[in-house]
Amino acid sequence: MINVRVPATSANIGPGFDAFGLAYQLYNTFSFREKDDGKLTIRGVSHHYQGKSNLVYKAMNRVFERVNYSPKGLYIYSDINVPVSRGLGSSATCIVAGLAGANALCGHPLTEKTIFNMAVEMEGHPDNIAPAMYGGLVCSIGNNDDNYYIKKEVADCFAFHLIIPNFPLSTKAARKALPKTIPHKDGVFNVSRATMTYLALTEGRPDILSLSMKDRLHQPYRRSLIRSYDIVCKKAEKFGALGECISGAGPTILVITNQEESNNFTTRMSSFLHATEPEWRLLTLKPDHVGYTTEETEA
């Protein structure tokens, strides 16, 4: 049995639109086994996802086609802990796991860089794929069909809180909300703040982070898609947030605090959510600095 564990991620981190991603210690784990009955068996997900439209299976087929390998049959089991369609990289976990799992079943013919490029091609952009694969805080770019990343560890003075609504928001709908063009001044605004956000997180500068996590490229256009977004962000600031932003395409809201303020923030925000949005969840997670892992066990 091949087991692949992939972390949840937040893309963008405010101003780093389509460029930044951060991995968390929250994981989806996928198990793969080739079998002899010629059938596809998928378990651990609803019946709707137990067929050939399953994203993990689609990713596996990309590898099989590339290396000219035909499994007789496949067993796929998904242990899902990352909320689906909440802006936490659930699709990236499926893509990375499917590619890595298939590569392991085939005897590892593909390099990790090849898997990275294949994963980005499937996802459409590297901001979630890169941290899902490599962990940490990752800045990534694409150059034609090749992709590159720089990974750094986040300073331990920060705490990361994820406020997860009880409704999904598709990436397609979030993308549709964006304008086709932006003013030049908004681009300049984001370039400086994205740079400073990345440096503040890696160098432990909460004083800078409290100023830099502003954005004019995507959040002003997406905030209306998330019920209670404005009031939650205002409360987060009142409760000690250094910065808050939409995680990925949303609707999850990422709040960053100083580590020493973490427990106080959690207590106050939990009480507020219980009173206003009782079906929403609040998770406080540590960054993952490992990325995906693959291991082989007895079936």
Image (cartoon, rainbow, N blue to C red):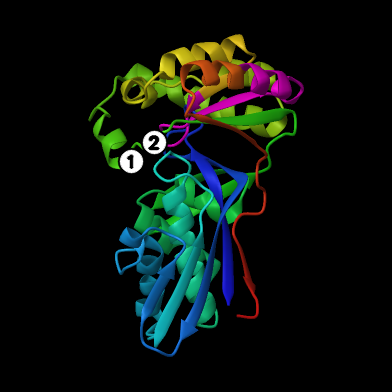
* 203 or 236: nearer the viewer: 236
Question: Which quarter of the image is occupied by the N terminus?
Answer: bottom right
Image position of 222 with respect to 104: above or below: above
Question: Local crowd at mark 2 within 10 Å, few (<14), some, or many (≥20)?
Answer: many
Left or right: residue 185 compared with residue 110: left
Q: Which residue is mark 1?
A: 171
- Describe the element under mark 1 as helix, strand or loop: helix
Task: Tell me if label 2 and label 1 are in contact, CB under 8 Å.
Answer: yes
Indicate the secondary structure of the residue bearing disc 2: loop
Residue at image position (48%, 83%) is: 34
- Mark 2 vs 1, N-terminal side: 1
Quadrant housing residue 108: bottom right
Residue positioned 58% across, 69% down in the render: 3
Figure quadrant of residue 208: top right
Which one is in front, 13 or 81? 81
Query: Magenta segment, which residues?
Result: 245-268
In the rendered image, residue 220, in percent from the top left (x then y), is placed at 35, 20
Tell me the kind of residue under disc 1.
Thr
Does 197 lie within the magenta span? no
Residue nearest the viewer, comparing 193 with 4: 4
Q: Which residue is mark 2?
A: 249
Q: x, y percentage for residue 264? A: 71, 18
Q: Is residue 6 visible?
A: yes
Checking the image for residue 56, the label placed there is: none
